[in-house]
Amino acid sequence: MTIEEIKSVSIYNWMKENNYGTGSIKGKNVFYCSPLRIEKTPSFVVNTKDNLWYDFGTGRGGNLINLVEQLNPSWTMHEVLGYLEKQIKEKKLQFNEDYNARILEEEKKRQWFEGRRSEYQESHNHETVVDKISPLTHPILRDYIIQRRIDFTIAQKYCREVHYSFRGKRYYAIAFMNVANGMEARNKLSKRCIGKKSISAIYPKEVPQKQCCIFEGFFDMLAYMTLYARIPDNGVTVIEQCDFFVLNGVGEVRVLLPYLKEYDSIHCFLDNDEAGRTATKEIAKAYPGISIDESYRYQSYNDINDFLLEKK
C-alpha cells in the first residue's frame, strides 16, 4: 500500500470509524471538537472535498497521515504508516475514487511507455551476446575510472567487466548490475543497458541500515563512496551509515519506491537538472517528512561526480 493511497482515504470516514462522531456538517466542511486538545466549541474542520483537516486552535493541518502523526507524536513514520495500513484493512476503508481513477490512468500511460521502451530494449538485446563477465581489470576501463577521479578499488568492489558482441562487433565495458539481473554497461565512448532496465540496490554493510542514499547513476554512487573514503569533511556525504540505491535512469523511480518503505531517512543525491528535481519531488511526495533533497550540497555542479572532478 503506497503513501498516496493511504493519504487518499477519507479523513471523515476514518474519524467516524474511530469514534470521533459524525461532526457538524456545513457544506463540504465538517466541524469537530479537536481530537488534539480539550475544547467545548468545535474548531477542528475536515474538508471532505479536498480531504484535508485544519485545527484552528493550533494552526496545524494536513492529510490523514499528518493527523495520525499529531495524535501520536512519539510514533515514527513507519509506525504511523503501519497503523493506518492496518486500520484501512480492518475497517475496510476505501481509497478516494478520484485517486483510483487517476492512478488507473497513470498506470495505463506507464504501461504503454514501458511497453515501447521494452520493445526498443528487446530489439537491441536480441542482437547482443554477452561473451564474458569477469572482475574489473581492463587497463583502459581502469584509466577511464581514474580519469573520473573514482577510487579504482571501490569501483572493483561494486562493478564488473563485461565483454559482449553487438551486430557482429565486439565491445567491453564497466558493468553495474541491477535487481532484474540486467546491467548498465559503460565505457568512455558508450553508455547502454544490457538486459532488463531496473534499479540497483547496494548494501555496503551487508545488513539493511536505517537510512539510505539515492543516486541517478552508478558513477555518482562511486563518487560519493570515494569522497566518503578519501576526503573527510567534504561537505557532500552524510555521516550516517547508509544503504545505496541507483536509479540507472530517472524513469525507474516507480520501481524504487517500494524499496524505501523500511527507512527512517532517505537522502536524495540526484542531478541538479529538471529531470533530477522531478524525480526528487516524486520521492518526497511518496515519503514526506523522511525524504531529504541533498542536491544543495553540490548546487554549483550537475552531479556528485562533477563535484568530485573539481575537488582539490
Image (spheres, grey):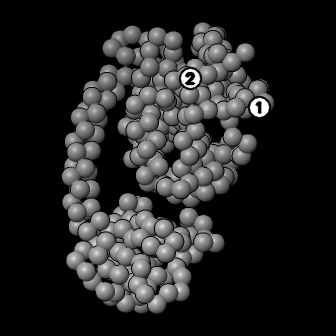
Foreground pick, 26 / 174: 26
Which one is nearer the viewer's eye here, 280 or 113?
280
Identify which amino acid the numbered label 1 is placed on. Asp
Horizontal side, residue 5 vs residue 108: left or right:
right
Mark toward the viewer: 2 or 1:
2
What residue is rendered at 49% in x and 20% in y? 186
Q: Position of residue 130 (x, y in %)?
A: 45, 24
Residue 201 to residue 224: above or below: below
The secondary element bearing badge 1 is classed as loop
Residue 63: x, y in percent? 41, 66
Disc on the earlier residue, 2 or 1: 1
**Is the residue marked by circle 1 packed among few (<14), some (14-19), or many (20+) residues within 10 Å?**
few
Per the model, the C-alpha gap separating discs 2 and 1 is: 18 Å
The residue tagged 1 is: 233
Q: Say what amino acid the circle numbered 2 marks.
A: Ser
Residue 98 in sight: yes
Name the image quarter holding the C terminus.
top right
Residue 309 shown left or right of residue 43 in the figure:
right
Residue 303 lies in quadrant = top right
Q: Is residue 30 depicted above or below 53 in this figure?
A: below
Disc marking residue 190: none
- Foreground of the two, 52 or 126: 52
Q: Secondary structure at mark 2?
A: loop
Residue 300's label in the rendered image is: 2
